[in-house]
Image (cartoon, rainbow, N blue to C red):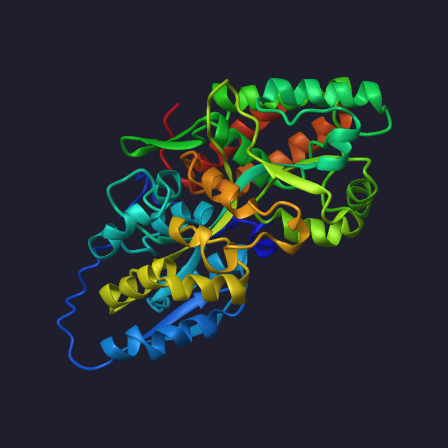
Amino acid sequence: MPYTKRRRLVSSAVAVALGATALAACGSSSDDGEARSGPVSLTYWTWTPGMDKVVDLWNKGPGKKEQITVTVKKQASGDTLVTKILTAHKAGKAPDLVQAEYQALPTLVSNDALADIGDTVGDVKSKFAEGVWQQTTLGTDAVYAVPQDIGPMMFYYREDLFKEYGLSVPATWEEFAETARELKRKAPDKDLTTFSANDSGLFAGLAQQAGAQWWTTSGDKWKVGIDDDATKKVAEFWGGLVKEGAVDNQPMYTPAWNKALNTGKQIAWVSAVWAPGTLTTAAPDTKGKWAMAPLPQWGDGESSTGSWGGSSTGVTTDSKNKEAAARFAAWLNTDGDALNALAKEGGIYPASTSAQLSGAFMSPPEYFANQPDFYKKAAAIAETTAPSAWGPNVNVAYTTFKDAFGAAAKNKSDFTAALDTMQRDTVADLKKQGFGVAE
């Protein structure tokens, strides 16, 4: 899923202030008086490659039978798409269906752009991991989208070099730190991994695994907990490793980072299920030398992971055929043929648990041909996805993270101070926009 791994989020300009309401209107009901007669035409805005071919399966199958035709309108992703959706919604002309990243859902919902489709799609909840489904409900009884693809996090390591240096795959973060130190003792010129501040999703996912709840609601107000104990634990852990030099402090996705992976200077990477695609281009000479394992845990016997990437399919409040649109959204993300096509044409890792061990996921990624059970392990890890809590100004938190943590990593200074800055800036922005904020 390389196209979901570094998605920018909505700009504060489009996160329209709605006074003291926390979630504001929370979308409208899926009841659109669908006592319709005759065919229905729906429009779907999406960035997923090959989606038109997937939708053809619907139009020639269930859609033809139900007289529901869907037309794909290819869009840009991230800020551009969310801005376009909200602009269209303001004019009452949003499409029937939209692809939306989980982090963007609170902004769309707080602007009353997404409908509650729970009455139509509620029965598909069992097809998704609890922590994944929760991201589309925003902690309420409503359902604002159907999960499409996910990015469960895991630990990647050079199997050959771990064996060469007598290292064990860490089961806990404490063992992870000791492994980093042990490697430094045995090979001072190598690093277990790097702490990178140029992709906020990595840190957010690690905090999520630790139990962080960055945005929650208290009555009609937002409560920001970016500096909660769980996130402080993560910040102090990585800050300590960087300060002592146990791990590198260079950003990811640079030529230098690619070279470190390709030459074995960096021998592990905390990443997500889409990592094989990145490694294929970043470290082509090491194909077949990597293995994947669950993320280290904070306590013995625990089993939890965070998310890094992923998106959903929502129905807009402007749609005149919400129930029909919701039925398509459910089909797209739960039907076996649709999901196989999404994997083949769009390269996604499906949110639906049943699809994670079928079709395109019965064989490992080519880069990981040495690990036949790659997707079996990935499915088990995905099932342990921890709940997340997003708010209407994720973009501000993410931007501040890159600035504050970027400087702290470069200077090997206090990560806790950087976290305080992130908390302070996020709260200030919510207040500036007019949202009620619980202190």
Q: Position of residue 237 (x, y in %)?
A: 62, 20
Residue 372 placement, left or right of 427: right
- Residue found 30% across the figure and 75% down from its top: 63
Is residue 21 shown above or below 86? above
Query: Residue 407 versus residue 193: which sits nearer the camera?
Result: 193
Q: Residue at x 29, y 79 (%)?
A: 64
Quarter occupied by the C terminus: top left
Q: Is residue 316 left or right of residue 299?
A: left
Residue 241 vertical position relative to residue 140 in the rendered view, above or below: above
Residue 253 visible, this orientation: yes
Residue 94, percent from left and from top: 37, 66
Q: In which quarter of the view is residue 430 placed?
A: top left
Q: What percent of the width, then of the height, locates residue 71?
A: 40, 76
Task: In the rendered view, tell whether residue 48 sits above or below residue 166.
Answer: below
Describe residue 84's horizontal placement relative to residue 120 as left or right: right
The residue furthest bottom is 38
Closest to the observer: 142 or 26? 142
Q: Residue at 21% of width from left, 55% of height from top?
A: 29
- Residue 185's spot in the image, x, y percent? 82, 18
Q: Write the residue at 40% across / 35% down.
A: 387
User: Residue extending furthest right?
Assistant: 189
Residue 12 in view, yes or no: no
Q: Nearer the viewer, residue 277 or 291?
A: 291
**Numbered circles on residues, count:** 0
- For residue 286, side relative to residue 320 (left or right): right
